Image (cartoon, coloured by chain):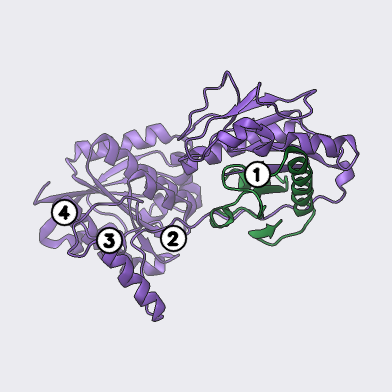
Chain colours: A purple, B green
Amino acid sequence: MSDHIRVLHFLNPFFAGIGGEESNYMAPRVEAGARGPGSRISQLLANDGELVATIVIGDNYFAENQLQSREAVCAAASDHHANVLVAGPAFNAGRYGLACGAACEAVARQLGIVAVTGMFSENPGVDFRRRGVYIVPTGDSARTMGDALPRIVALSVKLARGESLRPAAEEGYLGRGIRINERLPQSSAMRAVDMLLRKLHDEAVESEIVLEAQEVVAPPPPLRDLKDAVIALATETGLIPHSNPDRIPSARSRVWGKYSVVDLKGLTSDQFSFVHGGYDTTKVNQDPNRGVPLDALRDLEDSGVIKQVVNEVVSTCGNGGSLLEMKRIGHEMAQEAQLQGATAVILPAT
Amino acid sequence: VLAKEFERVGLPTVIVTSLPDVAVQMGANRVLRPRASTFHHPFGVAQMDADHERIWRREAVLAALKVLQTPVDGPTVFDF
């Protein structure tokens, strides 16, 4: 933590005033002092510190030479004894936003110095906020530079001084998904009742827990004719053969398994059971078809209602799983189902 | 979350669960809630005798197949 702030500024050639589209492949270049929007940053820093150097890297060069680019930014920060990196802002420029995020992540991780960038909320680079990067939201174009820079500098100064931050929304940066405990005069029960009463009176209520907005996946068209349907069974109920060959755990699973049901008329309790710490598995262990209805599907296959049941059941345990892991597992399962020729999926879940 | 990944690659997917709110919140598009079953076994009604339960399960699977044949615009809960 330092009283005198030394800022390294990261820019692409366009914003540094070095070139246009043709400079996208420019290798890292470090210059003393400010360039482009850096001069305004110097002014805003005033007595708090100075902008000591500027590193310029082309967006495409950065994208294709991640490691070298990150190292170049870290080296420039070390060489100039910078204790803050300001990147961009990138507004809605996608490749520039990704470069700014990566530059910030690199110095924050490798050097432990403060790193702040700015970009539009829909810039793909905003994902770096989940990797610990401070991102100040800006408008979608450089027209909003004048508004963005004071906020970026103010946050940088605050962080460099080691001042404690208020919640992201109040402080003016994009939440990084970090929750910090704090002591409040009222217990959670009182706050909850208070919140309920306000809700009943149609007053504004703000949840203390921010739920992540979920990504929307457009539903694919429905099955046309059941007679042609090849149905895959996929599940998060923790279905396993007794030996649990994939060692699926009862919670926070990072693995999944595919289990052959070829020639089986149904799932039997002498072959299959369930591993899941989030529900009572007694009844499904007695009759696994209660969890994953292979017997009924075979019946419908035999009577020609559907064409076929996929002979591999894919399974994991969904209890307490991380969203990212489940997304990966789901993607891998989906590829497997496609490989097996499935045209639709039944997914029993608890 | 899993259902969305199947649908992302183009496979219509029905999630069968007693907790449809969670599924909808996560963005699953086709959700079937079998009223008679429980959280612990979406395709079972343990208090029925075995034959009746099997008949019920066949109906529940048919209901799931029907959901797979139904066009939806976004997260939708079907009851059985």
What label does residue A188 carry, if any? 3
Q: CA distance from mark 4 to mark 2?
A: 28 Å
Of the two numbered discs 3 and 4 in the rendering, the one whose residue sits closer to the viewer: 3
- Count of numbered circles on the image: 4
**Upstream in the sequence, badge 3 or badge 4?**
4
Q: Are marks 1 and 3 on the same chain?
A: no
- The residue identified by callout 1 is B47
Q: CA distance from mark 4 to mark 1?
A: 75 Å
Question: Residue at position x 59%, y 39% from top?
Answer: A330
**Could you tell me the amino acid type at mark 2?**
Ser
Question: Residue at position x 69%, y 54% from top?
Answer: A219
Of the two numbered discs 4 and 2 in the rendering, the one whose residue sits closer to the viewer: 2
The secondary element bearing badge 3 is classed as: helix
Badge 2 sits on which subunit? A
**Taking A335 as reference, is A194 above or below it?**
below
Q: Is residue A80 left or right of residue B73?
A: left
**Could you tell me the amino acid type at mark 4?**
Glu
What label does residue A121 carry, if any? 2
Of the two numbered discs 1 and 3 in the rendering, the one whose residue sits closer to the viewer: 1
- The residue identified by callout 4 is A50
